Amino acid sequence: MDMRTLGRTGLQVAPLCLGGNVFGWSADEAASFEVLDAYAAAGGNFIDTADVYSRWVPGHSGGESELVLGRWMHVRGNRAEMIIATKVASGMADAPNRSGLSRQWIMRAVEDSLGRLQTDYIDLYQAHWDDQNTPLEETLRAFDDLIRQGKVRYIGASNYRSWRLMQALWTSDRHNYASYVCLQPRYNLVVRDEYEQELEPLCRSMGIGVIPYAALAGGFLSGKYRRGDELPQSVRADSVKQRYMHERGFAVLDAVLAVAERHNAKPAQVALAWLLHRPGITAPIASATSAAQLQELLGSLTLKLSDEDVKALDG
């Protein structure tokens, strides 16, 4: 697996980042271990999670994904081989009113994440959401202190608008604080404008790594949703319907299916290969609930799209 450099860091990461949102949720611990083992065996080393995963599940409080990941690294003894990314900003069930990017919350949340992950450092600590109620100086000073303490190696931003990301970079530069080295935006073949119009030129000019989430549009681009088919009964299916099941979305899906057929490939592989083809993209994030599903996703790394394919997908 050919590695890529994450932004302006020296981190060498796999070109497909394994999403940890399913660990301890739609993939129980045994299934999560199976997926993680298969990913590591394939040469993967880049895993993304968050403290809040999976608080939304009835009976969960948040932290379930980090706990599973921490137990896996402990059992396998491979912490030093993995690049672990997690996030802060969302309230947990045991502290629902403590959220955002205040210094107080960051300092508590990082200790909780370190404990669940069974590690003494986090490779990439990300602001999960922008917090405009907390001064950027306070947030970035807290992150800078964590780096100086050795608890965090690098910091990143998720779900930031371009102007706020630029403000954050400027604030770090002005105060000589550590700065964001990567961005995690929602970006896929259907949802493109917000990233491509403003965030993409900013990230490319500033050397910011990009690890897009929702790379498969919640499963819409995997091919399991088709025009006229009855929707699965789930909260996720309702979200997919609202976000992606419109005329433009189906036009994109049609193009994905056509390219997949030409290459005898899976639709998900085409959607991921398109992202990997985009300049400035470090590693799209994709989740798997079984080793077989993971192997399908990894097929995107060897799928070579032609200029004709890219033109058809771009629409």
Image (cartoon, rainbow, N blue to C red):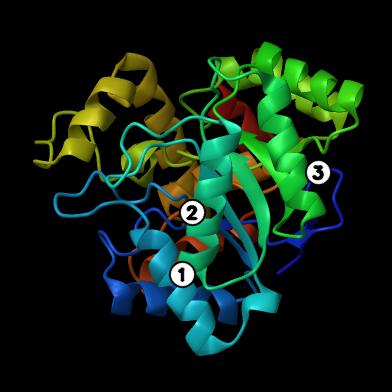
Q: Is residue 124 left or right of residue 61?
A: right
Q: Earlier in the sequence, mark 3 or mark 1?
A: 3
Residue 208 location, quadrant: top right
Quadrant where the C terminus sits is top right
Give me the disc on residue 185.
none
Residue positioned 55% across, 24% down in the render: 130
Q: Nearer the viewer, residue 89 or 157?
A: 89
Which secondary structure, mark 3?
A: loop
Q: Are marks 3 and 2 in contact (CB under 8 Å)?
A: no
The x and y percentages for residue 252 are 43, 27
Q: Which residue is mark 3?
A: 7
Residues at marks 2 and 1 touching, judged by CB atoms closer than 8 Å: yes
Rounded to the nearest angstrom, the CA distance separating label 2 from label 1 is 9 Å
**Residue in the foreground of this view, choosing between 163 and 224:** 163
Residue occupying image coordinates x 8% and y 41%: 233
The disc labelled 2 sits on which kind of residue?
Answer: Thr
Q: Residue at x 42, y 73 (%)?
A: 35
**Would you place residue 95 above or below residue 247 in this image?**
below
Q: Which of the two discs, 3 and 2, labels the residue nearer the N terminus?
A: 3
Please determine whether, in this image, residue 285 is positioned above or below residue 18. above
Residue 69's label in the rendered image is 1
- Which residue corresponds to the image point at 60% horizontal and 37% vertical from the top-left? 309
Q: Residues within 10 Å of mark 2 (few under 14, many from 20)?
A: many
- Mark 1 Cα within 10 Å, few/some/many (few <14, many 20+)? many
Tell me the kind of residue under disc 3: Gly
Task: Tell me the quadrant of the picture where the N terminus can be found.
Answer: bottom right
Image x and y of residue 249, in percent = 37, 23
Can residue 8 be seen in the rendering of this structure?
A: yes
Residue 286 coordinates in the image, percent (x, y): 48, 52
Gap between marks 3 and 2 measured at Cα: 19 Å
Lower sequence index among marks 2 and 1: 2
Residue identified by numbered label 2: 49
